[in-house]
Amino acid sequence: MNIDINLLPEELRPRPAVETRTLFVILLILALAGGCYLLFDAKSDAEAEMADLEESIDEVNQQINGIRQEGQALKNSVDRLDTLTKSYESFVASRIIWGSALERVQSLKPTGVDISALTQQGNTLLIGGTSSGYSAVTSYGRALDRDTKFTLSGWPTLNSATFSLTVRVALGGGG
């Protein structure tokens, strides 16, 4: 066993190259600084992502508003088209196709009846002409009345050989 007796004063004695306490304090400071750096870096990354997300949300909201406006414009166009379609259907249902009605008047005419005048007032048609007798005119009136396209308005009148007959034409004119 050796006894080490150091007679040198403490200031002159050799020291270890690094003291453990100093090394520990340096490592602790470095660890705290690194932790703070990582914390602030993560926080700044999160803030940058939040800013990017807010920009994306703003862009998406602008797109949604644009799509809403386009959707509303399309809805208005569809409503306008429905209105026009209903107006057209109403117009078609309320008009009289006179060509078809006149062809039907001619096709129902029996022998012995000659039509010389047709007068239209609204949906009423006044038929005038000559006839060989009252029975031919009445059979013509009955034929028109039985037809779904016409309604007889009163009985036919016959003066000498001329007659007049008034019928109402159904909407669509029998078309």
Image (spheres, grey):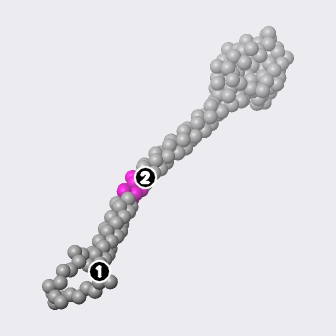
Give the mark nearest the N terminus, 2 or 1.
1
Please give the residue where the numbered disc 2 appears in the rendered image: 60
Q: Quadrant of the N terminus?
A: bottom left
> Is 21 on the left or on the right of 84, as rendered?
left
Determine whether 49 is above or below 89 in the image: below
Q: Which image quadrant for residue 36?
A: bottom left
Left or right, 155 with reference to 13: right
Judged by depth in the image, the label closer to the viewer, 2 or 1, is 1
Q: Position of residue 2 (x, y in %)?
A: 29, 84
- Specify the amino acid type for callout 2: Val
Residue beneath disc 1: 21
Most extreme residue toward the front, as rendered? Answer: 1
Task: State yes or no: residue 71 in magenta.
Answer: no
Percent position (x, y) of residue 85? 58, 36
Judge by depth and name the residue closer to the eye, 24 or 150.
Answer: 24
**For this view, does 31 lie left or right of residue 101?**
left
Task: Identify the magenta region.
Answer: 52-60
Q: Which quadrant of the rendered structure holds the C terminus?
A: top right
Question: Could you say whether the residue bearing mark 1 is in a helix, strand or loop?
Answer: helix
Q: Nearer the viewer, residue 58 or 105?
A: 58
Assess disc 1: are there few (<14), some (14-19) or many (≥20) residues with their C-alpha within 10 Å of its C-alpha: few
In percent of width and height, residue 17 lies at 22, 75
Label 2 residue SS: helix
